[in-house]
Amino acid sequence: MPARASGAVPGDARHARSRLRVLLRGALAWTLVLFLLNLAWEFAQLPLYSLGPYEGWPRSAYAVLHCTVGDAGIAFASYVAAFALTRRPDWPLRRPLAGLGIAVIASLAYTIWAEWRNVYVLGNWAYARAMPTLGGIGLAPLMQWIALPTLALLYLRWRRHRSLSGHV
C-alpha cells in the first residue's frame, strides 16, 4: 500500500513545477516579442483609424500604447490557449504548427469581437476611409494576428536554434 493516500509522488510535483516554468518562460518570451511587433504595427496602422474629435499626437500615442498593451494580453492568452490544446508548454519548439494555428485562431476570434464592439457598439474608434474591411471588420487588425504571431514563432525558433548551436 502506498504511503500517500493521494498517490502523488515527489517527482510529480517537481515535474509540474518544471512544466509551469517552461510555460511561463515561453509565454513571457512570446508576449514580449509580440509586444514589440505589435507596437510597430499599431504605429503603422494608425492612419487607418479615426480616433474622433481628439485626434492629435497625445490621443494617438495613448491609443497606440493602450492597444499595444491589449495586444500583449491577447498574445499571452493565445500562448496559454495553444498550451492547453497542444498540452505542450514548449509548443513553439515541439508543436509549432499546431500551436501557431491555435494562437492565430484564438487571437483572430478575440480581435473580430473587439473590433466589432469598439467600432460599432462603443464607438471608441472608427475606421478611416483607407481601411479595407471584410464583413465590416478592418483587414489591418485581422492581418496583424496572422502575420505577427507567425513572425514571433519564426523569431523564437531561430533564437533557440542559435543558442543551441553555440551562437550567442
Image: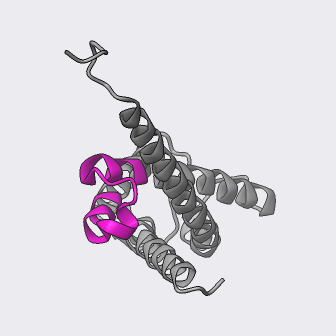
At 35% across and 61% down in the image, what residue appears? 91
Name the colour scheme: one colour
At 48% across and 82% down in the image, what residue appears? 161
Quadrant of the drawing holding the N terminus? top left
At 40% across and 53% down in the image, what residue appears? 78
- In the drawing, does residue 35 fall left or right of residue 151? right
Front in this rendered view, residue 96 or 118: 96
Range covered by the magenta-colored residues: 79-103
Q: Is residue 41 above or below residue 9?
A: below
Magenta stretch prevailing secondary structure: helix
Q: Is residue 101 above or below residue 19?
A: below
Locate residue 101, reporting x and y percent.
27, 65
Locate residue 123, reporting x and y percent.
51, 45
Front in this rendered view, residue 146 or 167: 167
Question: Is residue 92 inside the magenta stretch?
Answer: yes
Which residue extends farthest top?
Answer: 5
